[in-house]
Amino acid sequence: MKKLLFICSQNKLRSPTAEAVFSEYEGLETDSAGLDRHAKVPLSTEAIRWADMIFVMEKSHKSKLSKNFLPFLKDKKIICLDIP
């Protein structure tokens, strides 16, 4: 089973929506988190370790993810969806 992690800023709209949509597909396990400290579900190293693939909504999210979690991103595929 592929594990997909969706990340946005606050984990209020974009990443939870993507999580819900992709959770309907067989063979996928999904989760979501936010990069901001006050996000509904703040991103954790555990979530990163859990994920096979990480989807960010904006290029700035990818930069912030790399800046704050670089040691945990080895061998992780990170895809930017360009959803502002």
Image: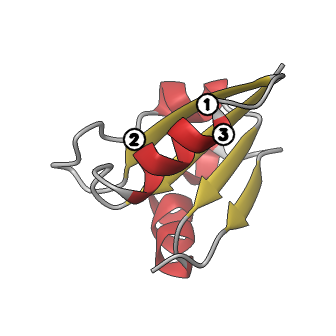
Give the numbered dot on residue 65. none
Q: Which of marks 2 and 3 is nearer the N terminus?
A: 3
Mark 2 = which residue? 43
Whichever of callouts 1 and 2 sits on the residue coming sooner in the sequence is: 1
Tag 3 secondary structure: helix
Q: Which of 30 and 35 lies nearest the eye of the viewer?
A: 30
Q: Which of 77 and 55 is in front in this view?
A: 55
Q: Which amino acid does label 3 sit on?
A: Phe
Say if mark 1 contacts mark 2, CB within 8 Å: no
Horizontal side, residue 26 vs residue 21: left or right: right
Q: Where is residue 42 in the image (x, y as percent from the top left)?
A: 30, 40
| 61 vs 14: above or below | below
Could you give the CA–CA distance between mark 2 and mark 3, rounded to whole angstroms?
19 Å
Name the side, left or right, on which 46 lies relative to 71.
left
Quadrant containing the C terminus is: bottom left
Mark 1 residue element: strand
* Amino acid, disc 2: Leu
Which residue is rendered at x = 39% and y = 41% of the image? 43
Cβ atoms at labels 3 and 1 below 8 Å apart:
yes
Q: What residue is disc 1 on?
A: 30
Q: Callout 3: 10 Å neighbours few (<14), some, many (20+)?
A: some
In the rendered structure, the answer to whether residue 28 lies left or right of residue 8 reads right
Q: Distance between the residues labelled 1 and 2?
A: 14 Å
Q: What residue appears at the point 28 percent right and 51 percent down from the top-left corner?
A: 12
> Residue 45's x, y, as percent?
49, 32
The residue positioned 54% from the left and 40% from the top of the image is 19
